[in-house]
Image: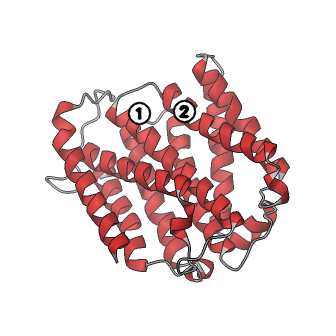
Amino acid sequence: MAKVIFKVLTLLVTMQVSCAMAPFKRHVMLPAISRGGARPGLDPTCLAKAFGTACMGQGVLNVLAPSIETPYGGEEINECNAKIIRRLGLCVLNIGVFFYCLLFKGYNLRVSASLNALMWVAENISSLLNSQSETTGPSKASDIIMLAFTAPVAYSGLNDLLWFGTAFKACSVLTIASSLSCISPSLGVKLWELKNDDEFTPGFVSICGAAMGTLGTLMGSLAWGVDPLTSAGYTCAAASVLDLKAFFFTPEVDKIGHNKTLLAMWPIFGAVTAASVLL
């Protein structure tokens, strides 16, 4: 109960702080964009910032403390599921970093894309050097493929190379393709060649697939020239649909035993933000 109350309070405080600071931030957006939101009083940029901040907080929590997501009633989560949760956290953290760099600071897309790509480069290299394919998975081939797509994004973005756009588009396509595990978790477990998995693993794979689909929507929108705020709206819409599917219409996730009331906050938050931005 304390954990639930803490997350709810954190979300509310995040929204209040973002709204309070909105007048003092310079929004570097396309000048022609002007939206009133789905309802009077709902500021689209404010809600998008709040959603991004919540993603950063949840992503950091998943990456640094994957055992908090344990379904075992306090027992230590196994290494395979912890690996999935960390990568789930990286996806969610990437969304938060994109929102922060583009909506809060108005940085160039290359900056946020390079930062996020470097996170995956480090994750994949660490997995390869520690031979995690033999203990937890994913396979070496999977790590090498991800490294082959993320390293060019980081390199071209940091060095301001002309082919950054092509590399970023390719990486966004790979991310979207990886979200298929949300539809078929068992297939995802086989394709990723996970080791030492258990009955809870497909559920975590499904949630990770939903996060990848959400991140892929954001990356694809930005890669093909959609402005940051509209991209944020598409991302929140995708998050709402994919989270709803993963949390409430996936039997494998039911086995984990998550608090459904708490999980419902994400699709609701995403739907409200998407409506405010896009309508």
Residue at the front extreme?
75
Q: Residue at x 43, y 48 (%)?
A: 56
Q: Earlier in the sequence, mark 2 or mark 1?
A: 1
Q: Residue at x 30, y 59 (%)?
A: 11
The answer to whether residue 116 is above or below residue 250 is above
Q: Residue at x 42, y 71 (%)?
A: 263
**Location of residue 251 in the rendering, given as x and y in whole percent from the top left corner:** 60, 82
Q: Residue at x 49, y 66 (%)?
A: 243
**Location of residue 182 in the rendering, given as x and y in whole percent from the top left corner:** 62, 66
Q: Badge 1 local density, few (<14 within 10 Å), some, or many (20+)?
A: some
Please say whether residue 119 is visible from this viewpoint: yes
Measured in 3D between alpha carbons, the distance from the residue under mark 2 to the one under mark 1, in whole angstroms, is 10 Å
Tell me how many marks there are: 2
- Callout 2 amino acid: Leu
Q: Nearer the viewer, residue 216 or 131?
A: 131
Please say whether residue 224 is visible from this viewpoint: no
Whether residue 60 sits left or right of residue 149 in the image: it is: left
Which residue, given by chain and number where applicable, does mark 1 sit on?
101
Residue at the left extreme?
41
| Callout 2–callout 1 Cβ contact below 8 Å | yes
Whether residue 182 sits left or right of residue 126 in the image: it is: left
Q: Badge 2 local density, few (<14 within 10 Å), some, or many (20+)?
A: some
Asked which secondary structure carries label 2, the reply is: helix
Q: How is the image coloured?
A: secondary structure
The answer to whether residue 165 is above or below residue 211 is above
Asked which secondary structure carries label 1, the reply is: helix
**Location of residue 252 in the rendering, given as x and y in whole percent from the top left corner:** 63, 79
- Callout 1 amino acid: Cys
Determine which of the numbered discs, if any, sits on residue 152 in the image.
Answer: none
Determine which of the numbered discs, if any, sits on residue 115 in the image.
Answer: 2
Q: Quadrant for residue 119, please give it.
A: top right
